[in-house]
Amino acid sequence: MPNPSAADQANARAESFRTGFSGRPMREYKGLPIYAAPGLHEAAAELLASAAPTNARVLEFGAGSGAMSLRLADLGFRVTASDLFPESFKPTEVPFVAADLNGAFAAQWPQGFDAVMALEIVEHLENPREVLRQIRALLPVGGQLVLSTPNIANPVSQALFLRTGQFQWFRDVDYREQGHITPLSPWVLEKALQEAGFTLRAERAVSSPFRRLRRLGWGVRLLAPLFALLGGLPASRRGEVWLVRAEAG
């Protein structure tokens, strides 16, 4: 049997994530499930609203069920949603365009946008740096990017890495079931943003990394509070998720 192509593997990981939440209790926005850490959608919407006019043209990548796209539309933004799986997207009032972010997706929107939102998506992708370069091509100077990813620098993740060599949200189970294939520390992601033509304007820590600590074993439970006490990271880089707003230069 021939080995699957890179595209087949990426699609299989995405499909596993799409179906993996079936039957689980989820937070919702107007009946649409939110596939994100607690508080992330609210914080991301607030970050965008602080920098973009309410009638701005916004492209949301990794739109999933459409919960975030609908939230943004309700705030007055002119939203276009995009995901690999159109069948998952529910809001009929928001335009949707299917796109594979592991390919050359920017050419699908030659007109560009005023802002892009990409929550919890870069960790699923094979080349985040190329994705950031393509997102930059979609934006004018001064355009806004709101982006998040699991924060591997948080104290729980540091303790888990010391014990197992794997970061929080980047264990075997996360690779297999959620397609988390690319861990990016805040330091690495900040450098990638700069090299793609962005300037970091705001950053936030979202959700407590300790909320699922009991599942990670006694060693991590003992070490994580020490890392929290002794670590020198700013508070904005200690959460479960790192959320940023970057401006195109």
Image (spheres, rainbow, N blue to C red):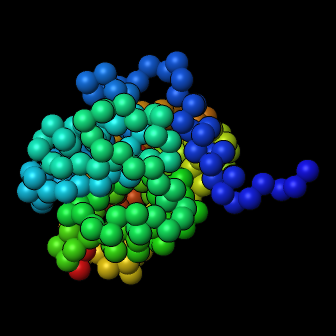
Q: Quadrant of residue 34?
A: top left
Closer-to-camera residue (219/63): 63
Question: Viewer-proximal residue, 62 or 240?
Answer: 62
Q: How many marks on residues?
A: 0
248 to the left or right of 231: left
- Does the image show residue 18? yes
Q: Is residue 18 above or below residue 62?
A: above
In this rendered view, identify the residue nearer to me: 172 or 110. Answer: 110
**Quadrant showing the C terminus:** bottom left
**Relative to 205, is 35 on the left or the right?**
right
Residue 160 in picture, x, y percent from top left: 57, 48
Outermost residue on the right side: it is 1
Q: Position of residue 210 (x, y in %)?
A: 42, 37
Quadrant of residue 197 within the rendered picture: bottom left
Q: Residue at x 14, y 56 (%)?
A: 56
Residue 112 x, y percent position in the rendering: 27, 67
Judge left or right: residue 35 versus residue 170: left
- The answer, for residue 226, to whether it is visible in the render is no
Residue at position x 38%, y 81% in the image: 195
Q: Where is residue 66 shown, x and y percent of the image?
A: 34, 36
Q: Is residue 74 above or below residue 145?
A: above
Q: Residue at x 83, y 56 (%)?
A: 3
Looking at the image, residue 179 sits to the left or right of residue 100; the answer is right
Residue at left 27%, top 40%?
94
